[in-house]
């Protein structure tokens, strides 16, 4: 490796050198703000006539010189700066060509020569060899057109053209002094790093240097890691054949970059579940897998990634072409429970391998939907399911009857265990008595499925044309008609049954029905329930009053329908028993909530605080694994690293003692919520910091501290 401090213009003006951005590199990403910062730095250097350092450029020679004598160098790091400087030089040269009288400061070179020195190798060459810089992917043709002053391609790069126009605008400014700009350009300094082919590890050096500019995404890092060490022809082949299609799979998705990261995380869980890969460190986990575990070729790896990515997009991004499978996938996606995804990815791969057919897969998706929804109704959290599902898909390939195996595995845990599949009795009881509106994010999904089950070929979509309606309104304090209909105990009845499933329905006229009396809601000539086309309103149409009795009866009717939608699997009990985990000696972490932490369960003093906190942790830190010990409920990553411990406190209204593994010296605590417990040898599992989470606490303040752990 040769590394030297050098003027930037000497790099850009090197004779017969073509800097080639490899196909695996991300596209040009700088915006106007980035360009403005560089412009201001250059103009400041020009005014002060002092050197200004703008980072490093990392490149490696690629083969022998071409027939034109042009030496090709692959540009490993620095393409954003080199591209931006080329745009600036283009705008500056255009200005001097139109205003030659303002170029008197050029003492050693004429204006026409600037383009040949800094933008061209030789105007007589054809192809890439003609230019100083050849970009990757779609950016190449745009930059070449800009430099050659020819028509832009049909799908030109907007960032390149926008940034060029920004430089043109700043150069046209009244206060612009071309001599200051030239002096600034002449004072720019870089570290010019040329690697030795076959000796220097470009990937390691690139990672250590890539700390400035726009952060690379997991997509960028993984792409670079897979392709960087390969010869350019092989890079191009693998990129165009596999990687380009892989990126395209996620390009149209909302939050495509996040979806790619999630896909890679789930794929790594499939490959190395025993390592419990961390979602926020996918690149490192992928590198470790490829270096320590993978023994195939790069092409085989990309083939597998592309195959799994297409199935991921079919299932979770709405790309499935089979109508019946798409409905099954969409129903699961609507539940927003993501730990099931690796298991479904493995099963779709079994469809590819013809070990199961699509009808079997569709039936299993119905089982998954029932499993996940029943758990949400009875208040079971998703923590721990990543590990559980890993135990299911790890052994799928060895099964002769995959469908029976998967269903049996879902039934192996009883009510005291992590992956419990709620029974018909438990599900029915909870669904017909719980609050199905407040703090139940699945309420729209629930009513939509109940409605569509009664006319599956003409489905509706809740949240678009249809809204959730309370038959008995949410507020009746000033509604004498409702109070009279409910009777003397109207307040108690309203509090207990307002959000019951029996009182919830669908309408397209929520604001029109409002808090009106039941008779008005029933008989309104345009919007009344008697005019409603929805199956959910069939029972309501037949009533003359709406009280506790009708709500309970309708809840039971809907509960019976629910049992036909979200079915409990039928598997021979002996088969289920054969797959149950063998009982082992209990360890300190082998406890259940029911045994040690009842205050966190429904009816307990800390239940509301615990449920709200756990739901937020699941959303923001899905890779945190929940576990139960004798004295606390903990969260960890990687099977060992403690992130948080929760201890119930049942005095008064109840509170949760949050045990944070960081000291108050390392926490940003603007609300002064932290209590230093170091003098008392810590709290819970020896944590140095305590935070009390009470009914009066603001969850966002609590999460701000937890996020730091």
Image (cartoon, rainbow, N blue to C red):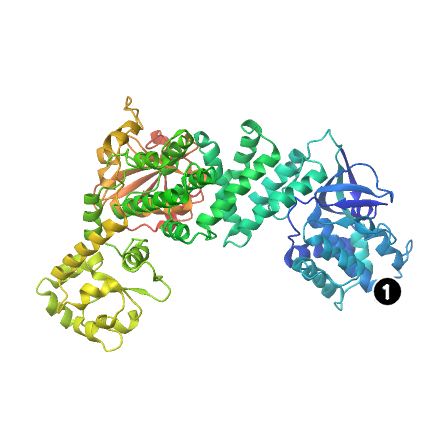
Q: Quarter of the image holding residue 574?
A: top left
Locate residue 397, reporting x and y percent: 42, 31
Q: Classify 607 as above or below 515.
A: above
Residue at (78% x, 55% y) in the render: 46
Near mark 1 (Cα within 10 A), the count class, few <14, some 14-19 or many ≥20, is some
- Quarter of the image that includes the N terminus: top right
x and y, in percent, of residue 648 in the image: 26, 39
Q: Residue 75 vs residue 698: left or right?
A: right
Asked whether residue 104 appears in the rendered view, the answer is yes
Q: Residue 210: x and y, percent?
A: 64, 41
Q: At numbered mark 1, what does the secondary structure look like: helix, strand or loop?
A: helix
Q: Nearer the viewer, residue 266 or 206?
A: 266
Residue situated in front as seen by the camera: 151 or 194: 151
Q: Is residue 471 visible?
A: no
Question: What residue would you read off at disc 1?
Answer: 102
How many numbered marks, from 0 up? Answer: 1
x and y, in percent, of residue 694 in the image: 29, 47
Residue under the image location 58 percent in, 30 percent down? 296
* Residue at the image point whose x is 27% and y is 38% from the top: 420
Q: Is residue 67 left or right of residue 363?
A: right
Left or right for 575, reference 297: left
- Which quadrant: the C terminus? top left
Q: Looking at the image, which residue is at 18% across and 44% down?
A: 425
């Amino acid at each position: 490796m040769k590394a030297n401090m050098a003027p930037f213009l000497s790099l850009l003006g090197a004779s017969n050198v073509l800097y080639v951005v490899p196909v695996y590199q991300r596209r040009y990403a700088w915006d106007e703000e980035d360009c403005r910062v560089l412009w201001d730095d250059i103009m400041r250097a020009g005014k002060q006539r002092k050197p200004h350092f703008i980072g490093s450029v990392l490149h490696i020679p690629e083969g022998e010189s071409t027939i034109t004598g042009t030496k090709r160098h692959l540009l490993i790091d620095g393409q954003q700066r080199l591209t931006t400087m080329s745009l600036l030089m283009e705008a500056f040269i255009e200005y001097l060509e139109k205003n030659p009288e303002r170029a008197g400061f050029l003492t050693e070179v004429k204006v026409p020569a600037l383009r040949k020195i800094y933008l061209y190798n030789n105007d007589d060459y054809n192809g890439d060899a003609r230019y100083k810089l050849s970009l990757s992917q779609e950016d190449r043709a745009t930059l070449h057109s800009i430099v050659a002053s020819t028509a832009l391609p049909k799908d030109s790069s907007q960032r390149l053209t926008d940034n060029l126009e920004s430089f043109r605008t700043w150069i046209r400014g009244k206060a612009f002094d071309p001599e200051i700009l030239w002096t600034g350009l002449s004072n720019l300094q870089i570290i010019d790093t040329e690697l030795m082919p076959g000796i220097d590890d470009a990937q390691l050096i690139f990672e250590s240097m890539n700390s400035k500019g726009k952060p690379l995404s997991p997509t960028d890092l993984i792409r670079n890691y897979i392709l960087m060490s390969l010869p350019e022809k092989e890079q191009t082949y693998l990129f165009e054949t596999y990687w380009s299609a892989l990126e395209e799979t996620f390009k149209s998705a909302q939050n495509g970059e996040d979806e790619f990261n999630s896909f890679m995380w789930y794929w790594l869980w499939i490959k190395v579940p025993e390592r419990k890969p961390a979602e926020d460190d996918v690149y490192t986990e992928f590198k470790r897998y490829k270096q320590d575990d993978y023994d195939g070729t790069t092409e085989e790896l990309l083939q597998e990634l592309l195959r799994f990515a297409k199935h991921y997009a079919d299932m979770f991004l709405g790309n499935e072409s089979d109508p019946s499978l798409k409905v099954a996938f969409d129903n699961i996606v609507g539940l927003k429970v993501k730990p099931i995804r690796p298991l479904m990815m493995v099963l779709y791969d079994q469809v590819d391998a013809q070990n199961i057919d699509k009808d079997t897969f569709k039936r299993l998706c119905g089982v998954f939907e029932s499993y996940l929804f029943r758990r949400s109704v009875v208040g079971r959290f998703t923590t721990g399911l990543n590990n559980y599902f890993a135990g299911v898909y790890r052994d799928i390939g060895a099964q002769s009857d995959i469908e029976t195996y998967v269903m049996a595995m879902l039934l192996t845990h009883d009510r005291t265990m992590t992956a419990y599949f709620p029974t018909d009795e438990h599900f029915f009881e909870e669904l017909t008595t719980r609050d199905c509106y407040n703090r139940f994010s699945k309420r729209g999904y629930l009513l939509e499925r109940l409605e569509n089950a009664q006319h599956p070929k003409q489905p509706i979509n809740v949240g678009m044309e249809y809204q959730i309606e309370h038959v008995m309104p949410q507020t009746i304090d000033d509604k004498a008609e409702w109070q009279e209909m409910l009777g003397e105990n109207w307040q108690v009845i309203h509090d207990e049954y307002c959000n019951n499933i029996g009182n919830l329905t669908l309408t397209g006229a929520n604001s029109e029905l409002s808090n009106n009396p039941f008779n008005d809601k029933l008989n309104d000539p345009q919007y009344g329930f008697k005019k409603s086309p929805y199956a959910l309103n069939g029972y309501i149409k037949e009533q003359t009053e709406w009280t506790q009795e009708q709500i309970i009866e309708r809840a039971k009717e809907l509960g019976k329908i629910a049992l036909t939608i979200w079915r409990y699997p039928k598997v021979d009990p002996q088969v289920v028993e054969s797959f149950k985990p063998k009982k082992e000696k209990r360890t300190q972490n082998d406890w259940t909530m029911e045994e040690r932490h009842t205050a966190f369960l429904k009816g307990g003093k800390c239940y509301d605080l615990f449920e709200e906190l756990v739901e937020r942790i699941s959303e923001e830190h899905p890779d945190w694994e929940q576990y139960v010990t004798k004295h606390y409920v903990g969260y960890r990553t990687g099977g060992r690293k403690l992130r948080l411990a929760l201890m119930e406190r049942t005095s008064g209204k109840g509170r949760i003692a949050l045990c944070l593994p960081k000291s108050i010296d390392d926490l940003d605590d603007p609300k002064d919520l932290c209590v230093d417990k170091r003098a008392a040898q810590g709290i819970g599992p020896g944590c140095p910091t305590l935070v009390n989470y009470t009914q009066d606490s603001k969850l966002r303040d609590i999460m701000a501290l937890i996020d730091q752990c």
